[in-house]
Image (cartoon, grey):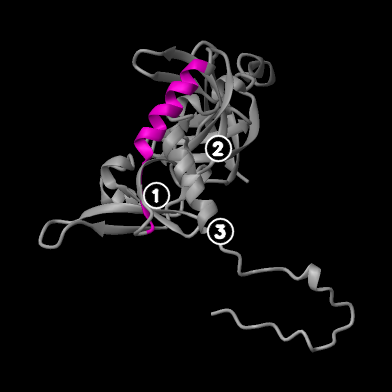
Amino acid sequence: MAEELNENVMIEGFDPAKMVDQEQDHSMENWMTIYGAYQNSKILYASISGIEKVGPDGEDKKACAVVRVGSIRGLIPLEFTGAENLRHLRAMTGQDIAFMVLNYDQENGLFTGSRTKALEKMADITLRKIEEGDVIPAVIRHVGDDYMLGDIGGIQIFLPISEIRFGWIDDLHEEFKEGDALKVKVTAIDKEKKDVQVSAKALQENPWPDCVTRYQKNGEYVGTVSGVREYGVFVRLEPGVDSLSSHLKFQNVRKDDRVLVRVDNINTEKEQIRTRITRVL
């Protein structure tokens, strides 16, 4: 219960007209947002703030994502979240998602929603607006060992490691995380299958074949170890240009070590340089 304000206290500079009201009730305003979204199939955005198990007593309860419009609680059943399982849904908590209102119960202060329905609508809009060659942002949803999954306006895109940038990428998890965004170029569109292919690498300047003018066979150059694998050592000579060297016989090198390498072979067609480590700096 709000306490009555004692206005008998004299305070220099106090103007009742400038009193900030922190007790405003925005619940009706929030319900109007929900009504409007339901009636007009409007997409709303909110953060997944929790997970609840919902269902009749005595039956298996279903996991639901919890979202809020102001103070009004919304539930999105697992099958409508786009998550593959409960573990995946837990990984989505704290993330902002799009959803559409399926129904509402003002008496109980609750509404239900669907993220998958929102993504379908977003995908249809995206396919109408994009063309091959467009540059658009993609939000990363999953980082794998040699690929990333992203989202462009409700459409999931697959980005293999070979289309991220020029040069060797040692560990995608070190460079990218879920929620990051990067620019990609649309390289192909199949509107019937709602499939869009993209490349971040296509937006970058290819250092080949120009880089071969800076290196020659038997020349020795300073580089930085960019990765170590059982089959060899990758050495970065310049951004986008990594050579592959054999392991040293009597010494191990680690990532970020500076080394001197001798060029054994340059293959412009395959965009490969083979080197030998002659000294660890």
Mark closer to the observer (1, 2): 1
Assign a secondary structure to mark 1: helix
Say if the magenta span includes residue 114. yes
- Viewer-proximal residue, 133 or 237? 133
The disc, 2 or 3, on the residue closer to the chain's N-terminal end is: 3
N-terminal of the pair, mark 1 or mark 2, is 1
Q: Is residue 18 visible?
A: yes
How would you classify the magenta stretch by its main secondary structure?
helix
Q: Looking at the picture, which amino acid does disc 2 mark?
A: Ala
Q: Which numbered tag is attached to residue 26?
A: 3
- SS at badge 3: loop
Residue nearest the viewer, comparing 8 with 223 = 8
Place of residue 147 in the rendered image (x, y in percent of width and height, measured from the top left): 41, 33
Residue 277, horizontal then vertical, whole percent? 54, 36
- Against 118, residue 86 (above or below) is below
Relative horizontal placement of residue 15, taking residue 209 as reference (left or right): right
Residue 181's tag is: 2
Amino acid type at mark 1: Met
Residue span colored magenta: 109-128
